[in-house]
Image (spheres, helix red, strand yellow):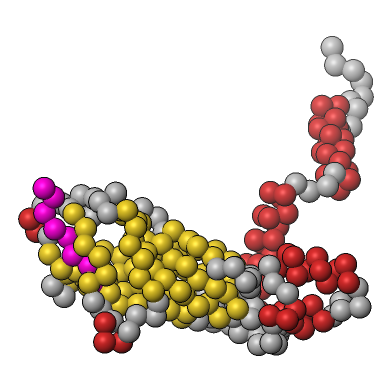
Amino acid sequence: MESGKKEEAGPSRGVVNAEEKKDKHREMKTETPLTISEVLLADEDEEEEYDDEDVKEGDGVVSGFSPGPLVSLKEQIEKDKDDDSLRRWKEKLLGCVEGDLNGQMEPEVKFHSIGIISDDFGEITTPLPIDKNQNGHVLFTLKEGSRFQLKLTFNVMHNIVSGLTYSNTVWKAGLQVDQSKGMLGTFAPQREPYVHTLEEETTPSGALARGLYSAKLKFEDDDRRCHMELNYSFEIKKSR
């Protein structure tokens, strides 16, 4: 038999428990620090909201952002000239002394030599710059299928050069047949020259690979300043 009066319908205890758990979970989320992933996702959501307003179209520059002026190393060192220990620490870190700096802000990279290292003949070094009358001359001759590396000696002056990269483009009979690119790194001024060896390469093999090649070796920093552009030639001969 049914009871004389029914109780008013209300949320079951299971539903109440579920709501309490949700409330507790919300409280925990507000108290628990966000993970790195959550922060990144939140930043991405915020970026989508202001991308069209705050970024200039096509150049990726945020409006209102003004990069700081380029400051010479000499000026940076002179900021602490009264603190001998700090000044010496800066000079040691930068690999230079104050007397070598003239206040010039633009970095300068001076290349002294280019060498070729190969198992065929050891190492051949050519002083730089190459005479204009010899620009594009045959720098080295290699056997087909041989491994070799280019070796460079250079100095950095006046300021830190950031993101120094190279590109080496090769042509045969007027057609581009190869191009390699790489990062040398960031270098501070110092009295002793830097010596950097590029990645090892292997010359092609076969009758079609033999002959004379022309090439252009170019060095730029992350501000697109060109520090050297060298035109040279090399030859690949039959392996005996």
Q: Residue at image x 39%, y 74%?
A: 127
Above or below residue 32? Residue 80 is below
* Horizontal side, residue 91 vs residue 61: left or right: right
Q: Residue at image x 55%, y 68%?
A: 193
Q: Position of residue 203 (x, y in %)?
A: 23, 55
For the N terminus, which image quadrant?
top right
Residue 202 visible in image: no
Residue 168 visible in image: yes
- Is residue 20 or residue 199 the one in the foreground? 199
Q: Position of residue 145 (x, y in %)?
A: 20, 49
Instruction: Locate residue 105: give its quadrant.
Output: bottom right
Q: What stretch is highlighted in magenta?
A: 233-240
Instruction: Locate residue 18: give its quadrant.
Output: top right
Q: Where is residue 150 in the image (x, y as percent from the top left)?
A: 37, 61
* Horizontal side, residue 18 vs residue 237: left or right: right
Q: Position of residue 52 (x, y in %)?
A: 60, 77
Label the magenta part by its dominant secondary structure: strand
105 inside magenta stretch: no
